[in-house]
Image (cartoon, rainbow, N blue to C red):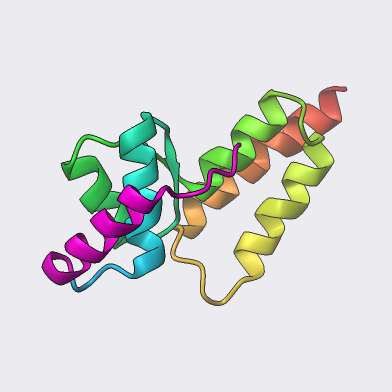
Amino acid sequence: MKTVEASALELLEMQRLSYLERRLSYYDLINFIIARDHEYILATGDNLLKKYAEDHGVEVIRTLKIIELMVRSQVISCEEGIRACQLLLDAPSTRIPRQKIIQVLEEFQKEVVVE
């Protein structure tokens, strides 16, 4: 994961796109532009931004996949991955299908038992 500052040209592009894409926020648009211009993978849980980015050739990674990658890359432990999945299950505003979260959670739990 990397944080990148927007250039002046990217900010101007954001302003231009904001007139065309009224459903996306300034934050969504600048994140899309930076990912597009630098050929980065865009991390988002927002469905509108995901669809827009994919329709415009930007690869998107979702919240649950980020947790999986962090566990697989040993950035966080399986136990921390389990806690993150549990937080997603407990969050009333999550739009991630419960069954997908439970599936990943069970995979992590199996690994903890095996270790």
- The span picked out in magenta is 1-21
The answer to whether residue 103 is left or right of residue 33 is: right
Q: Nearer the viewer, residue 90 or 32?
A: 32
Left-right relation of 51 to 105: left
Residue 46 in which image quadrant: bottom left
Q: Quadrant of the C terminus?
A: top right
Residue 67: x %, y % from top left: 63, 41
From this view, report whether residue 74 is shown above or below residue 20: above
Whether residue 59 can be seen here: no
Foreground residue, 85 or 37? 37
In the rendered image, residue 8 lying in the magenta stretch gets the answer: yes
Instruction: Name the residue furthest right.
Output: 115
For the N terminus, the image quarter is top right
Is 56 located above or below residue 39 in the figure?
below
Q: Position of residue 58 (x, y in %)?
A: 29, 37
Query: What kind of secondary structure does the magenta stretch mostly adopt?
Result: helix
Give x and y (percent) for residue 89.
61, 63
User: Which residue is at a point 42% across and 34% down the rendered structure image?
Assistant: 41
**Is residue 34 visible in this depiction of the protein?**
yes
What is the quadrant of residue 70 in the picture?
Answer: top right
Image spot of residue 16 (x, y percent): 18, 62
Could you say which is closer to the camera, residue 85 or residue 36?
36
Q: Nearer the viewer, residue 33 or 44?
A: 33
Q: Residue at x 54, y 43 (%)?
A: 4
Q: Is residue 31 left or right of residue 113?
A: left
Residue 20: within the magenta?
Answer: yes
Q: Kindly give the residue lying farthest to the bottom in the view shown.
A: 92
* 76 left or right, relative to 91: right
